[in-house]
Amino acid sequence: MAFDSVLADHLASTFGASAQDRVRLRDAFVQHYAGVWRFLRRLGVVADRVDDASQQVFLVAIEALPRIVPGCERAFLYGTAVRIAHGIRRRGEREITGLDVDLGSSPAPSPDELTDQKRAREMLDQVLERVDLDARAVFVLFEIEGFTVPEIADLLKIPIGTAASRLRRSREQFQILVGSLARTPGGSRA
């Protein structure tokens, strides 16, 4: 069954959420589900688990609705996504996983464009996999999801200086890794 805003609303009412909280959850789902999904993917959650992980983020949000400050839903969702991604990665290190063949679909019209986009995503994922996990979270939140450094610091519960330092470190690692990827014949991993 697809996890959609109607299901989110139903689950929120099942958990006894007020009408106002149900509206907040439905709005948060519509506005942030795709971003949370992408964020989890970029944090290394494999394609066959990212849907479940995204749903788990919203299930946690349903239970926490009364404690989430209105207007802070986005920060709560992304903070929860970080913790869920870390948990999946820890469990994944103990499991044998299948091949990650499909990184998702794209609405691009031509097969060549689809292929190019897929290659670009695969290359981005290859590079991001090699960036330190703490720095990667900050990098993805800042560079891809558009959070500010103070928002990231608040979200990850770290000092602003630490967030800025991790961003600087992740950018340096990213540049080095992209440079080494560009020098490798065919642009593949060495």
Image: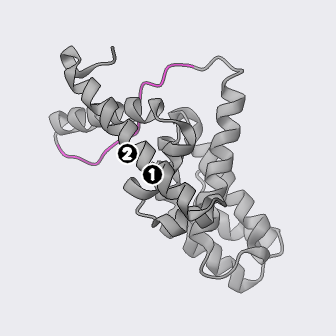
- The quadrant of the image that shows the C terminus is top left
Q: Residues within 10 Å of mark 2 (few under 14, many from 20)?
A: some
Tell me the residue at 56%/19% (across/down): 98
Residue 82 vertical placement versus 45 (above, below): below
User: What numbered label is drawn on residue 132?
Assistant: none
Q: Position of residue 40 (x, y in %)?
A: 54, 46
Q: Position of residue 132 (x, y in %)?
A: 52, 36
Residue 120 vertical placement versus 78 (above, below): above
* Type of amino acid under label 2: Arg
Near-viewer residue (8 or 189): 189
Near-viewer residue (16 or 49): 49
Regarding residue 38, the answer to whether it shows in the image is: yes
The reply to whether callout 2 and callout 1 are in contact (CB within 8 Å) is yes
Residue 79 vertical placement versus 101 (above, below): below
Magenta includes 30?
A: no
**Is residue 112 shown left or right of residue 70?**
left
Near-viewer residue (161 or 37): 161
Q: Secondary structure at mark 2?
A: helix
Q: Secondary structure at mark 1?
A: helix
* Type of amino acid under label 1: Leu
Magenta includes 99?
A: yes
According to the picture, the residue beneath numbered tag 2 turns out to be 171
Tell me the residue at 73%/66% (across/down): 62
User: What numbered label is drawn on residue 167?
Assistant: 1
Instruction: Measure the alpha-carbon separation of dots 2 and 1.
Output: 6 Å
* Stretch of the chain drawn in magenta: 98-109
Tell me the residue at 43%/36% (across/down): 128
Regarding residue 1, the answer to whether it shows in the image is: no
Q: Position of residue 5 (x, y in %)?
A: 58, 66
